[in-house]
Image: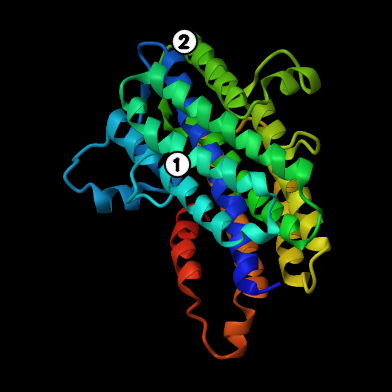
Amino acid sequence: MLSRVAETLYWLGRYLERAENTARFINSTTQVLLDLPRDAAFGWDVLLKVAGLDHVFAKHHPQLAQADEDSIVSFLIEDEKNPGSILSGIHNARENARTVREVLPMELWERINSLFLYIRDNAARAKIGRGPRNDVLQGVIGRLESIIGLLVGSMSRDVAYQLIKLGRNIERADMTTRIVDVNSAVRLPRDPALASVATERMWISTLNALSAYQMYRRHVGVHVVANAVVDYLLKDPHFPRTVLQCLAEVEGCLSVLPDHTDSMRRVRQAWRRIEQMQLDDLKPTVLHEYLDQVQSDLGAIHTAVAKQYFHLHQQANGNGSGNGHGEAVGQIQAQTA
């Protein structure tokens, strides 16, 4: 397979997963806001930092002295200047799918194109209010889940499939850490009783954002405790959105690809770091540092994958600049690694 095709398939998986998880990220934030008591506050500027988009936002919106809910939500959903927005991600996935249609199921292109038309025509509704915004984002999530279901159910487990799955799981692990980190943007009330209630509601919202609430109650317990939720979402080996399970999927994809030694070593490093984390009595600042370390490890995995499978021929020719696609996606990777 040509390295250009391999890179396109890999980023197809990442773009689709990023769009879905950005929608989940926004819904999680909205639910947290609805559940907060009066004395609690939410730092929208912190949310941008959690998303890794604060510098991009400041660059394209210097006129906004302070980021508010409407400007940030619009930036995350429909701003084409933001390469990590839902609209940008789906548009890029559509272009990638169009260029490699010969290796994909025929229906996949049709569904991705339909999804692009849906978000293009409905993105403006998301600015009307939180209710319409939730409806639009749930529509995006449902359509993306349908696309992934089509991939899983109708695509041969060949190299093309493994590359899409590889990109999807690296992106999913990264976005799971960011959704978990949303709670660092909340300033809790001083009253201990109110703070305890707010904390429980925040973590319930986090579990719901990742469709993990019922599985948490089944496998961990009915009581939602911050440290238990973090431990579950990082370390559970069975739920498909936990970081450890995503790393297991990444490892499985790499095992069937040639010359995977360096990439696999990076995966094992990330795996060991997560297993060694002590998650009892975590303070928000410590948790934020832990999640930053995980995101850095995921960035190192991406770099190793790109170096081996996408840009190896450029290194051999003494040219490390990358092609146009590599440069474009490198900008987004800098925001999420």
Q: Does residue 273 sit above or below 319 in this rendering?
A: above
Q: Position of residue 12 (x, y in %)?
A: 59, 54
177 and 329: which is toward the camera: 329
Q: Earlier in the sequence, mark 2 or mark 1?
A: 1
Q: In which quarter of the image is residue 68?
A: top left
Q: Quadrant of residue 269?
A: bottom right
**Residue depicted at 66% across the width and 74% down the height:** 2
The answer to whether residue 175 shows anywhere in this view is no
**Residue depicted at 80% across the width and 59% down the height:** 158
Q: Which amino acid does label 2 sit on?
A: Leu
Return the residue at label 1: 86
Q: Where is residue 85 in the image (x, y as percent from the top left)?
A: 42, 44
Q: Position of residue 59 (x, y in %)?
A: 26, 54
Q: Quadrant of the N terminus?
A: bottom right
SS for callout 1: helix
Kindly identify which numbered label has been placed on residue 194: 2
Q: How far apart are marks 2 and 1 (CA)?
A: 34 Å
**Residue depicted at 43% across the width and 15% down the height:** 34
**Left-right relation of 268 to 109:** right
Kindly identify which numbered label has been placed on residue 324: none
Q: Position of residue 106 (x, y in %)?
A: 66, 49
